[in-house]
């Protein structure tokens, strides 16, 4: 998105945009330690599976780059064994921040693989650190390129799918859930990238996006990105999806993913399963757009995907700008956090994600192509796109 990205690293400074105060305030905060990176991911100051993986990787880059400049040299750079003993717990710690987002695990495993390969090669500690820095930067940098590839794959497939179903493929209305644009990735986006690609190709009618649970604020971030891209769009509450499908022509639902199981079952932001069920009822194609790193071939199906549950209090709170608007001394809109439920509820169910079964998914798109189910089958063979 022009002028606003989830992460920026310039010189010796690593910053993220604080998504907890968007869209009314744009605030970049510095990440100066592994602990701060972990907290930013866990507290959802940064969100979106690809962006989380990028921050974790760049946090290690920042940490090791600083270490190489220190005098005297830190003890963990004295030998390959000492460096391994230092880096391995860091990677393990970063992984614990958001367990459902498989991209985070893929990034930490990839960095660990680089560490092991460098150890086997007999390199000294500083050279191993430099290898890890290079790999960490690569993990972050390659995200935008693959996003553009998968967006084109998915957009072109949808145009042809509409033609196969008797449409013109010219003016397509697409619903998406949660934020999957440049604020959730390192650039361009996944499902929102598909919508952007259709817009750039002059084949998008309108983008529709759902307002999910208050704390997750996916729609607010999506609204910000679509507005900046000047894409015509409409926000709806997630309880209104059925009504939307009844009264408006929607050509597809496109969503991202935090983890895709081997059979195609997909974990994504809470509310995705609801949209998939309604899309199936109305015979609307349901498309998952996600990088290869989101596909977890070690997980057979959705039943084995760990689902993160957020603190119960988060489901009771909503944050936003005061209305009528009020401004602080810097000209920023003043914001407030309020409780929208009684304070003495008996129980609160607050999962961050749900799992959409493969049978409800029409197509899964990665940077390598589009997978669809074989005739008569309810699960996917993803071997061609991973």
Image: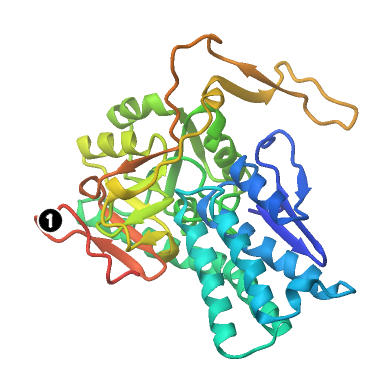
Relative height, residue 329 to residue 66 (above, below)? above
Relative height, residue 108 to residue 23 (above, below)? below
Residue occupying the far bottom of the picture: 122
Residue 379 drawn at (x, y percent): 19, 55
- Count of labels in the image: 1
The residue at 25%/45% (across/down) is 357
The residue at 63%/69% (across/down) is 85
The residue at 56%/71% (across/down) is 111
Colouring:
rainbow
Residue 241 drawn at (x, y percent): 36, 30
The residue at 60%/23% (across/down) is 318
Residue 40 drawn at (x, y percent): 66, 46
* Apparent side of residue 306 relative to residue 383 in the rendered image (left or right): right
Q: Nearer the viewer, residue 22 or 67?
A: 67
* Apparent side of residue 285 relative to residue 185 in the rendered image (left or right): left
* Apparent side of residue 56 relative to residue 200 in the rendered image (left or right): right
Label 1 residue SS: loop
* Apparent side of residue 342 relative to residue 124 in the rendered image (left or right): left
Q: Quadrant of the C terminus?
A: bottom left
Q: Nearer the viewer, residue 366 or 45?
A: 45
Crowd rating for badge 1 (residues with CA inside 10 Å; few <14, some 14–19, many 20+): few
Relative height, residue 351 to residue 128 (above, below)? above
Q: Pointer 1: what residue? A: 377
Quadrant of residue 177 within the rendered picture: top left
């Amino acid at each position: 998105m022009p002028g606003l990205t989830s992460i920026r690293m310039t010189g010796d400074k690593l910053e993220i945009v604080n998504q907890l105060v968007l869209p009314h305030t744009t605030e970049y905060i510095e990440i100066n330690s592994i602990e701060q990176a972990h907290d930013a991911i866990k507290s959802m100051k940064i969100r979106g599976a690809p962006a989380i993986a990028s921050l974790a990787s760049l946090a290690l880059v920042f940490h090791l780059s600083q270490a190489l400049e220190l005098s005297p040299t830190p003890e963990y750079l004295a030998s390959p064994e000492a460096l391994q003993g230092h880096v391995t717990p860091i990677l393990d710690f970063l992984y614990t921040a958001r367990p459902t987002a498989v991209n985070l695990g893929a990034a930490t495993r990839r960095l660990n693989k680089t560490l092991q390969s460098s150890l086997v090669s007999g390199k000294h500690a500083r050279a191993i650190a430099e290898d890890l820095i290079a790999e960490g930067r690569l993990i972050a940098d390659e995200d935008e390129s693959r996003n553009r590839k998968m967006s084109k794959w998915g957009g072109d497939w949808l145009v042809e799918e509409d033609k196969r179903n008797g449409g013109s493929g010219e003016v397509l209305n697409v619903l998406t859930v949660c934020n999957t644009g440049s604020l959730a990735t390192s650039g361009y986006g996944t499902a929102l990238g598909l919508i952007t690609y259709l817009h750039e190709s002059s084949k998008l009618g309108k983008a529709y996006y759902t307002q999910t649970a208050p704390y997750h604020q996916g729609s607010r971030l999506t609204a910000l990105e679509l507005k900046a891209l000047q894409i015509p769009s409409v926000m709806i509450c997630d309880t209104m999806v059925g009504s939307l499908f009844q009264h408006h022509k929607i050509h597809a639902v496109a969503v991202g993913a935090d983890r895709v199981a081997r059979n195609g079952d997909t974990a994504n932001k809470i509310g995705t399963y609801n949209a998939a069920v309604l899309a199936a009822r109305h015979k609307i194609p349901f498309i998952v757009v996600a990088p290869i790193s989101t596909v977890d071939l070690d997980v057979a199906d959705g039943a084995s995907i760990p689902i993160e549950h957020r603190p119960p209090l988060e489901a009771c709170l909503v944050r936003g700008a005061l209305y009528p608007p009020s401004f602080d001394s810097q000209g920023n809109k003043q914001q407030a956090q309020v409780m929208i439920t009684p304070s003495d509820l008996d129980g609160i169910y607050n999962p961050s994600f749900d799992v959409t079964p493969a049978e409800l998914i029409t197509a899964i798109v990665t940077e390598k192509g589009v997978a669809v189910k074989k005739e008569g089958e309810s699960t996917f063979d993803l071997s061609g796109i991973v």
